[in-house]
Image (tube, coloured by chain):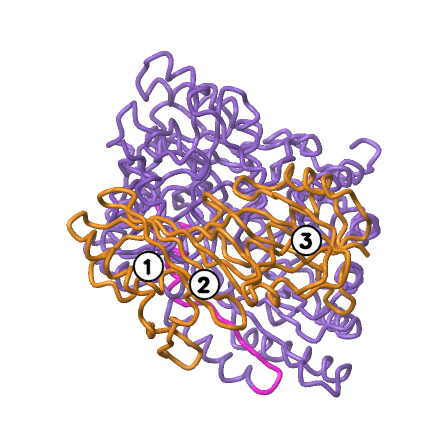
Chain colours: A purple, B orange
Amino acid sequence: MTTDWEKIQSSLNRVAKPGRYIGGEYNSSVKDWEEVDLKVALAFPDIYEIGISHLGLRILYELINDEPEMLAERVYAPWIDFQGLLREKSARLYSLENKRALSEFDLIGFSLQYELSYTNILTMLELGGVPLFREERRRDEPLVIAGGPCAFNPEPMADFFDFFVIGEAEEILIPVLKAVREWKRSGGDKETLYAELEKIEGVYVPSHFKVTYEDDGKIERIQSTTGAEPVRAVVRRFDQAFFPKRWIVPFLDIVHDRVTYEIQRGCTKGCRFCQAGMLYRPVREKDPGPIFDALRQLVADTGYEELSLTSLSSADYSQIEKLITDACGCFTPQAVNVSLPSLRVDSFSVDLAHKFQSSRKGSITFAPEAGTERMRRVINKGVSREDLLVAAEAAFRAGWQKLKLYFMIGLPSENEEDLAGIVELTNAVLQVGKKIHSRTNALRITASVSTFVPKAHTPFQWRGQISVEQTVTKQRYLQERIRGRFLELDWHNPETSFLEGVMARGDRRLSKIIHQAWQRGAQFDGWNDQFQPEIWWEAFRASGIDPNIYTRERSYDEILPWSHLNAGLSAEFLKAENERADRALPTVDCREGSCAACGVCPQLKVATRIAGDPDA
Amino acid sequence: MPSYRVGFVKERDLRYLSHLELFRTIERGIRRAGLEMVFSEGFHPHPKLSFGPALSVGIASRDEYFDMELVQEYPEEKILADLNRVLPEGLQVLAVKKILQRVKTLNAVINRASYTVMLKVDPGDRREIFDQLNQLSSLTLIEVVRNSKVGQKIVNIRPWLHNLTIGIKDDDLLELELVGEIGSGGNLRPDDLLSGISRPVEVLSVTRTGLWHEEDGLVTRPLDFCNKAGG
C-alpha cells in the first residue's frame, strides 16, 4: 500500500517552502509507532512558521514524548498549494514525524491561540480523514481536544471537540492521557471517558452542558447535566515546572527563530483589556540560577544564535537586570544575541535593551495603548506622557532611529480627544526624535493602531465593541492626521477585528456558522490576503443569526456564554474593575504588596512567587 | 586562522531545503559541534562560512562543499566526527580537509556539475522520448526560456551541455546522466533538457553526483585544491 507520504513525496517541489512538510528537524522526536500505546497529534491551526514558534506546544511535545509508552507528533495547517497537492494525490494530512494521517492517532490536540484560525481546524481535520463534528466520530476514531487562551471561551467551537483543557496544561496533561489510555483498553463508551476526565481540574466537556436561548437571542440558561464545574488548571510551583531540553531547530526561517526561555508566568499589572493578564495569574518567577543553567544547555544543544527571555512582561522580572547582564556576559562572546520580547515604557527598559541589543538598526517598540492620560487610567495602563517621552528620548539617545508605538481604538468611553491624543503623542515622540537625530533621514515613528476587542474573563467582558463603520471612521480620522515625513500609520482590517470579536464572546450556535463559512471557502481568516468577509456575512444571513448580538454591550445580569467556566477570577473583582474604569481609577499591581482581591490565589490555591523572596 | 573544506551529502527529504535553509542548518550544526567559527569584522558580523554552487529546491546531492574558518585548529577526523554527531538526518559529512594555502572560493573555481535524473514515462512513449533525448547531443542549438529580472528571455544551453547518456531502467523508467557547465561560464539545469520533449515525462528524482573544475581536459576536484597549486 502506498502511504500518504509516498503519494506526495516526489511532488513536494511543486509547493512553496516544501521544508514545511518534511519534518526531520534536529531534536524532533521520531518514536517507534508500534512500540507505544497512546499516539497524540499536536496540531496548530496555522502555517509551520507560526506553529513551530509557539512555546506551549513545544512544552507539551517533549512532555508527552518523555513518557515511554506515548508519542506526540506535530502537524501544522497546510498552505493552500499543499492542500491542493494532498487532494490531487488523494493523500491525507500527515504528521511530520512518522508521517501518519491524523485519523491514525488516538487523540488530536489543537492549540487555540487566535479566534480567526478556527476554520483551519476544520481544514486540517477534513484533510486528515477525521469527521469534523464530535457526534460523527466513532469510539475508534481520534478524540479531538483543544487548549490555549481561546479555550477559556471555546463555545463557538463546542460542537467539534470532545473536551477542552482550560488553563495551564503541563501538570494535568499526562494524567488526562493516562485516563484516555485506560479507557481505550477498557472498551467503555465515550461517556465513560468524559465522566472520568471531568474529575480532573482543567477539563471541560462541552456536551455535558445544555444551553438554552431566549427569543431575543440571549442565553436563557447553561445547565450542567453532570454537576461538573470546570475550573482553570494552574501550575502551583512554576519554578519547578517542566521545560523542554531538546529544543527543535527548524530548517525554515520561522517567526520566532530563537531559543525561548520562559522566565516567569503571569502578569498582574492589571490592564483591564488584557486577557492574558487575567488568565495566567498570579506572577510566578523562576530562579535566575536554574534559568541560566537551562539556557546554557539549550544554546549549546541547538546552535542557535539568539535567545529570548520570555514572559508576559519580562522587564518586571525581579532580577531582570542581573539576568540580562549575566546572559550578555556569557553568550555575547559566543555571538549569541540576547533579547526580551516586551519592554515597558520607561528608561529602565531602554537601558536593558541597550545592554542586549548590540545593533540598534531595528526598531524599538513601546505600548502606551491609548492617547490620553484619562484613557490610560480607564484601561489601567500606568504609563504617563512623561514616561513615554523620557523612554523615547532614552531610546533615541541610545541610537535607535525607528520607534514603534502601539495604540488601541474603540476602548470604552473613547471620544475624539482620545483619538487626538494618539496623533498628539505620536507627534510629540517625533519632536523628541528630531531633536536628537536632527541630521538623519532614517528617523521613523510608526503608530500601530489595533481595534479593541473585548475578551472573556476580563473586566471589559461586558463592554460593547465598536462597529465596522465606527472603526473605519476612527481610522480615517487618524489616517488624515498621522501623515508626513518620518511618520507611518498601521491599522487592522476592521472586518477582521469584528469577526474576532464575534468569536471571542460568541456562543455555541456559532459552530454551525463556522462550519458553513468554511464550506463556502473560508480559511486563514487572520491573513489579510486570504480573508473573505462576505463569505462570513452570507453564512450569518443564511443561519438567521445577527453577528452584532455578540459584539454588543451586555448587562451584569445577562448569562455570558463562558459563565460556567471558572478562570479563578471572582465576578466581584471583574465588576469592580469595570466600574473603576468608568471613574478612571488606577488599581495597583498586587506584586507591589496590595491585593486587589481578584480571587485567583484563594480559589486556585496558588500564590505569587518572586525569585529570591525568603519564603519563595 | 585555520580554514577547512568540508565535503558532504544532502539527500533524502533534506533535498527540499533551499540554499538559505541549508546554510543556516549547517551553521547551527557547526555551533552545536562546538567548533568556534571566525566572524567578519563590522557592524553585522557574519561567520566565515561559504558554500559551493546552490542546489535548486528538490535536488539531492552526493557531492557538496563548504569552506569554514575556525578560531582553533582541530584534526580533520575530529571535525568530521563532531559534525556528523549533530547534523540532522539527510546531511552527512564525507571528508574534511585543511586548506593549506590561499585558494579561490568554491564558487569561483567549480565549473562542472554532473547529475542523474530519473524519469517516469508512459511505456508507449519510451522509444520516442529516448530518441529525442539522444538527439540533443548532436544539435548545435537548444533554446530554452529563462525567467530573468527583466522578464523572460531565450537562451541557448547547448554550449553548456558537455555530456549526456540515457539508460533504460525499465519499461517506464529512463535514467539520464549528464555533465553541464556551472558557475560564471553558464548554468545548465537538468530540467532544461526536458523542455523540448514532445511527450509527457515525470521527473522522479534529480541528484547532483559531482562538482569539479575542468580546464583543457584536466579535472581537479574541490578537495584537491586544499593542498596543491591550482584554482
Instruction: Please state which of residues B82 and B223 is positioned toward the viewer in this rendering.
Output: B223
Relative to A391, say whether A605 is above or below. above
Circle 1 Cα neighbour tier, 10 Å, few/some/many (<14 / 14–19 / ≥20): some
Which dot marks residue A592? none
Task: Please check the rendered image and state whether residue A495 is part of the magenta-colored stretch, yes or no.
Answer: yes
Q: Chain of mark 2?
A: B
Residue pointed to by mark 2:
B180
Instruction: Please state which of residues A438 and A582 is positioned toward the viewer in this rendering.
Output: A438
Task: Please check the rendered image and state whether residue A152 is part of the magenta-colored stretch, yes or no.
Answer: no
On the rendered structure, is A615 left or right of B209? right
- Marks 1 and 2 sit apart, C-alpha to C-alpha, by 65 Å
| Image depth: mark 1 or mark 2 in front | 2
The amino acid type of the residue labelled 3 equals: Arg
Instruction: Please state which of residues A68 and B231 is positioned toward the viewer in this rendering.
Output: B231
User: In the rendered image, which quarter contains the C terminus of chain B?
Assistant: bottom right
Which dot marks residue B5? 3
Kind of element beneath mark 1: helix
The answer to whether tags 2 and 3 share a subunit is: yes
Q: Chain of mark 1?
A: A
Kind of element beneath mark 2: strand
- Give the mark nearer the N terminus: 2 vs 3: 3
| Image depth: mark 2 or mark 3 in front | 2
Residue pointed to by mark 1:
A548
Where residue A532 sits: x, y (%)? 31, 63
